[in-house]
Amino acid sequence: MYIKRYTIAALILMASVGAFVYTYVSKETTTIDLFGIPLPALSIAVWVVVPVFALYVASVLHMSFYSFLGSMSLRKYEKDYEKIIDAIIEAYLGKKSRSHSFKTDRYALLGKLLENTTMFPAGNVIGLTKNEKIDGVFKIIEDIKNGEVVDLKPYNLLKDNDLIIQNKRNKYKKGLLTAEAILANSSKYSDVLREEAYVDYVKTASISNILKYKELLSKESLQIVLERVNADEFTLGINNDELLDLMKSLDLNTSDYIKLSASIAKGGMLPEQRIKLFEMLSDENEDAVDAYLYTLFDLEVLAPVDSILDNSQPNEYQNFKAYRALKSANQNFSIELFV
């Protein structure tokens, strides 16, 4: 009930009762003792209205009190609603560290779920919620997906956040950020982005600069380095010892070594250096023996192949033994079968 309307109605009622008593009941005055204290002489009509007025005051205080409690409860819901909006935004942004304190049980339940959830917009949802903050985040996510560079500073996202990485990747692709700047600042850029930039960087960088950021070396970037050895363009002068150190820094398996040997064949490395490199690798790592055999077969240097296969155990290198047998029978199969 609205207190203002209630007050107007109560005043009309009190005036009506007082007028009725004064007009039709009695116009006399009287005095009343309240706890032994004589009160001023007033019209009987006034004394009749006094209890009604007291009831009005008490009811107004009662309603005001519960209205205050209701407004406080409503305020809690309004604050929690704003926190839920923030939690939804953080879920869409993929924030890792999220924590909100809710005052209401229902919003607390939703908040706990959202704090442990990552969400992604499906389709074109810009303007769907009619909430300015959420729709703004939808617009940012859509722009990043479309290769645009946006301002994510207001959201305080960590450097390894997917949106941060993609946004900086967009900036890099647009030429607004150099590979050198990304590689040189590990505190600002994620390892994922730095490794991607390193792949581009090694395509033209000198050996000293390649070794400078060696901790970012990946199988893909190592392959590029190997292909540049004695290549016609962006030639890289590097000896086998340096290449060996680079290859040792990665956790490579048998298949990886073979793929690297195949990639070297696409470049300009001299056959002698290629054979020596994988011979050195096979001496230190048994997983590289297959790649050494692959290299020898690829370059048609068969004497060391026979020595290795003839001195191996019956269950070792069976695929290469079969390949040798086929070649001996004039059955030509591409060595690329092993890649």
Image: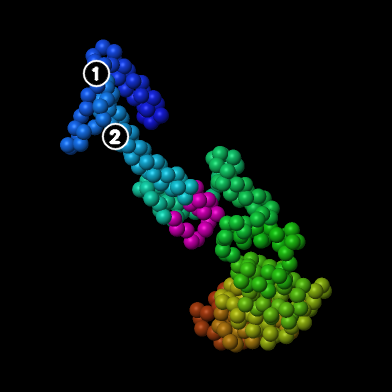
Q: Quadrant of residue 224?
A: bottom right
Residue 157 image position (x, y, % from top left): 57, 60
Residue 30 image position (x, y, % from top left): 22, 24
Q: Which mark is residue 58?
A: 2
- Per the image, label 1 sits on a secondary structure element best described as loop
Quick one: label 2, few (<14), some, or many (20+) residues within 10 Å? few
Q: Residue at x 77, y 72 (%)?
A: 204
Q: Over which residues does the magenta segment extend?
A: 84-100
Q: Is residue 298 magenta?
A: no
Q: Residue at x 66, y 72 (%)?
A: 185
Q: Amino acid at mark 2?
A: Ala
- Whole-Å distance between the Cαs marked 1 and 2? 28 Å
Residue 326 image position (x, y, % from top left): 63, 72
Q: Which mark is residue 28?
A: 1
Q: Which mark is residue 249?
A: none
Q: Residue at x 60, y 69 (%)?
A: 191
Mark earlier in primary sequence (1, 2): 1
Q: Quadrant of residue 321?
A: bottom right
